[in-house]
Amino acid sequence: MKKKLLESSIILTIIYSIGHIIIAMSCNIIINDVTFYGALTDGIIEPLINAVWFYIIHKLVKDYFKSNSNSSNFASN
């Protein structure tokens, strides 16, 4: 069950996004000295865009390794 959750692109994307939101908000408040609501806005929008990108990359890499694994097993039979 743990392995299945870790292989799931959507679960990894959600975990990544939550962490990214917290990091982006913290950086905006500390570095840019913006208001909480300004940091919240940037902290949500930018990570959501990155989450879509992360999901695409994870799916492509997972599918690539799955197809290479299947082709190498086929060739060895």
Image: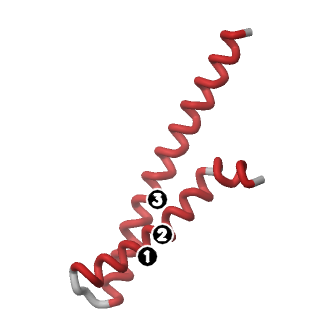
Depth-wise, is mark 3 or mark 1 nearer the camera?
Answer: 1
Residue 26 quadrant: bottom left
Query: Image check: 17 left or right of 67?
Result: left
Q: Residue at x 61, y 26 (%)?
A: 67
Give how far across and how far down residue 69 sits, in percent.
Answer: 63, 25
Q: Is residue 4 left or right of residue 41?
A: right
Label 3 secondary element: helix
Q: Which mark is residue 62?
A: none
Q: Mark 3 or mark 1: which comes first in sequence?
A: 1
Q: Is residue 16 above or below residue 38?
A: above
Residue on which disc 1 sits: 22
Q: Which residue is mark 2?
A: 19
Q: Amino acid at mark 1?
A: Ile
Q: Which amino acid type is shown beneath numbered disc 2?
A: Gly
**Total number of numbered labels?**
3
According to the image, label 3 marks what residue?
A: 51
